[in-house]
Amino acid sequence: MSSRKIILAIDGPAGAGKSTIARRLAQRLGFLYIDTGAMYRAVALWAMRTNTDLADSHRLEQLALAAVIELSPPGSVLLNGEDITALIRTQEVSGAASKVSAVPAVRRALVQKQREMGARQSVVMEGRDIGTNVFPDADIKIYLDASLDVRAARRLHDLEASGDQANIDGIVREIRERDQRDSTRGEAPLRQAVDAFLVDTSHMTIEQVEQAILKIYRDRTSNGKELEH
Ligand code: DC
């Protein structure tokens, strides 16, 4: 059996369905699931708790370097040993994470951690810059997208499911602002890598998206079946 580490990179804007699909694929393939957005969210939460000015890049860098972030079991997020899984999904943290992620020194600190994780074992890693910056040589690169309306409706559904108050207009505004900031920042902005496969999930079910990516995966890796659970 091959021991080569496989990197499956999934990038795309907020609400395109990255987390759901990345988690399923990781389970299916027996890979580690890494939600890099959760890492930026963890640093943002720590900054909020310590009243750190989000314009203070030096202090934010210190937090990012010092943060001990664990992403297991899959789907859970631990910051310095504390389970913060539910705490990082609020709209407030979303906004702060987007700002924190625009700080180059924060990105350097977290990208370093992400590369270390990917060097240890095969991973499905999702984020904004995985295929363009973190692992430019990733074996498979997927760019997941969906229309703004569909993405906002999904976000509303998620927030309601976790008991949060939200309205669709506010969410559309928040996603639009976040997309704008994430795709226009100077350091590693959100964009599709030239060699990434575009999958528009607007009118697809999760099963269809999963099958589409698995097909790409099998076509791209000669040992795809061998590695699959
Ligand atoms: O995917 P998410 O919504 O949990 O990400 C939170 C924020 O982190 C988002 O505004 C963009 C940023 N992010 C990033 O800049 N690079 C990544 N690889 C992942 C997330």
Image (spheres, grey):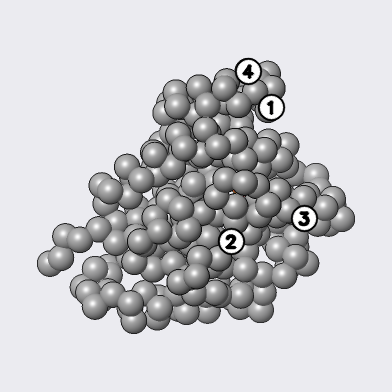
Q: What is the quadrant of the N terminus in the image?
A: bottom left
Q: Earlier in the sequence, mark 1 or mark 2?
A: 1
Cα–Cα span, label 3 and label 4? 28 Å
- Label 4 amino acid? Thr
Q: Position of residue 74 (x, y in %)?
A: 42, 48
Q: Quadrant of the C terminus?
A: bottom left
The residue at 70%/63% (across/down) is 151
Marker disc for residue 176: 3
Q: How many marks?
A: 4
Q: In the image, what residue occupies the spot 33% across and 50% down?
A: 118
Query: Is 212 left, or right, of 162 in this rendering?
Result: left
Q: Based on the displayed image, in which of its 4 quarters is residue 56 positioned? A: top right
Residue at point 55%, 75% (across, down):
199
Q: CA distance from mark 1 to mark 4?
A: 14 Å
The residue closer to the viewer here, 138 or 5, is 138
Q: Of marks 3 and 2, which one's residue comes earlier in the chain?
A: 3
> Dot 1 corresponds to which residue?
55
Residue 113, located in which quarter of the rendered image? top left
Closest to the camera, between mark 3 and mark 2, is: 2
| Residue 84 seen | no
> Callout 1, which amino acid?
Ala
Q: Which residue is mark 4?
A: 50
